[in-house]
Image (spheres, rainbow, N blue to C red):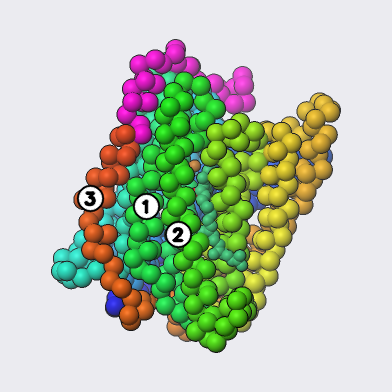
Amino acid sequence: MTVEMKLSRKEAKLSMAHMWVAFISLLIGGLMGLLQTLVRTGKVTLPFGIDYYQVLTVHGVILALVLTTFFIIGFQTTLMSKTVGMTDRQRKLGWLAFWVMTIGTIITAIMILLGEASVLYTFYAPLAAHPLFYIGLTLVIVGTWIVCFVNFHQLYKWKKQHPGEKSPLLAFMVVINMLIWFVATLGVAATVLLQFIPWSMGIVDDIDILLSRTLFWYFGHPLVYFWLLPAYMAWYAIIPKILGGKLFSDGLARLSFILFLLFSIPVGFHHQLLEPGIDPLWKYIQVVLTFAVVIPSLLTAFSMFAVFESTGRAKGFNSLFGWFKALPWKDVRFLAPMVGMIAFIPGGAGGLINASNQLNQVVHNTIWVTGHFHITVATTVMLTFFGISYWLIPVLTGRKLDAKTNRLGIIQTIVWTVGMIFMSGSMHIAGLLGAPRRSSFSEYGGTEQATEWIGYQFAQAIGGTILFIGILLMIYTFLYMTFFAPKGEEEFPIAEEEEEASPTPAIFENWKLWIGVMAVLILFAYTIPLIDIIENAPPGSSPFKWPIGRG
Ligand code: HAS
Ligand code: CU
């Protein structure tokens, strides 16, 4: 059984600094999202000459990259402190990382706001941004690398002090997530440092577009699991405690995280199925590996049902679906993540559709994909993060989750759900009807096909407006929890193992083995295609700036 540690005031402050950046990002990024859905109705034009793609870049970068990374690191910092502890030196390094990331974010944001970096969050070449945009992003990544090493060191130190003991589950999970992140960011760092920065500075004339996209997606897919795994941490190890139960299986939870470590990375080609220049055999192999990375999500679904059912039965609800009623629907710490889980059933199914080569031909580059990631990252992951915030922020600020917070949280969850059904639902349908993503056009000069989309684009705007109300509510609740909720000591819920649980196989902690297998799989999936891409590269491209004609 793991001994929990107390979170010191100083550690709480570090984590809270990350939360501030995350929630400020939510407000700014959310406002941009609202503007986009309004423009897409075809009835609204942005004032003061503000450009749609500039707004879209702020939205993507600030929500997908900044909000997520800061929230995740803030949350994981507390998990590490609670389970394996944090030394003064580690905390100081944590602050260094925070400032490096924050300065990087500010530099990037300034370049986007100046209109020098309207390249969207995937910054596909040959669209070029000001070099400082890429330099800012590099700083953010360097900051996260510092965090990686702090986390690895925290677990290493704990292991040395507890020889032969099993590491605490949550610390194990955090280290897996940061390992995935570290190995994945090597790809994006390579393209940014070796390709984008020299090219945007004019040191080299041309960029190899296919190589840059391939290195981006080597990072881009594990990125989505970097977002998802902290949600899984909460599902596996926190939700059971909120339900009044125990961990379903420590071993199964670790197995699923190890499978993520192995299969998250060698699968980036499923974002490039329509990209010419990659041999179909290697696309096929990476699609097979993509379907392998679905397995740990299915294990997770199974564990969650098992936890729900077993805690329900333990409370005496014995009929086939009686456990359903035993769930604490009125407790926002449960409700918000639970809606996230339910959303992941269609969200995951959509992912399987995307990953299927033939179906990808139908949905690729349509707004269906936008629908897919709003139901996954913006619903499953975000609602779980909100669900975590309702107890974590009070823990960090020395306050209580009171009835008012709970009520606000429940309303927020409902507002978010309704908004997302409208927005993501209509994006999925419009996408199937052919409506493109990443486009400010709505009516396409009155073409007939586009008229089929208009109704759904209105529905998106309605959903976007409801979601923005949800964001305002969340920000209000964040401020309330930070400054006004009653003082006290809020519980940090961490579930324990069953007394009679079967032991977790020791091999799960054989880091050398798993990192070795991960490296072999990555080399297998990427070496030959990369050699092929580099050897057979067409002429590269000079930079293009948006809006065309400027800079
Ligand atoms: Fe995805 C595109 C394939 C999961 C995010 N994805 C994207 C993009 C983003 C994104 C951001 O193969 C767009 C990138 C861009 O800008 O171009 N995705 C998948 C697959 C999965 C998947 C196979 N995606 C995610 C997650 C994301 C995310 C998670 C964010 C967090 N995705 C793709 C593909 C594309 C793509 C292609 C490229 C499309 C294109 O052409 O551009 C899988 O991991 C999904 C597995 C999940 C499941 C679900 C398990 C269900 C669970 C819930 C259980 C529920 C319970 C509650 C217990 C199989 C765990 C029950 C209670 C009751 C009461 C019923
Ligand atoms: Cu992917």
Q: Nearer the viewer, residue 137 or 132?
A: 137
Q: Three-letter amino acid code at disc 3? A: Leu
34 horizontally vs 293: left or right: right
Residue 340 image position (x, y, % from top left): 58, 61
Q: Rate crowding at label 1 as few (under 14), some (14 to 19) or many (20 or more) other CA atoms within 10 Å.
A: some
Q: Three-letter amino acid code at disc 1? A: Leu
Q: Nearer the viewer, residue 79 or 342?
A: 342
Visible residue check, residue 142: no
Tags 1 and 2 in contact by the CB under 8 Å rule?
yes
Which residue does the numbered mark 2 point to in the structure image? 299
Helix, strand or loop at label 1? It is helix
Mark toward the start of the polypeptide (1 vs 2): 1
Whether the residue under disc 1 has CB within 8 Å of ligand 1: no
Q: Nearer the viewer, residue 428 or 87?
A: 428
Mark toward the start of the polypeptide (1 vs 3): 1
Tags 1 and 3 in contact by the CB under 8 Å rule?
no
Quarter-of-image position of residue 290: top left
374 horizontally vs 250: left or right: right
Residue farthest to the top, as pictured: 539
Residue 191 image position (x, y, % from top left): 39, 30
Q: Disc 3 vs disc 2: which is toward the camera?
A: 2
451 horizontally vs 363: left or right: right
Residue 187 image position (x, y, % from top left): 36, 36
Which residue does the numbered mark 1 point to in the structure image? 259
Q: Within the magenta stretch, is there residue 544?
A: yes
Mark toward the start of the polypeptide (3 vs 2): 2
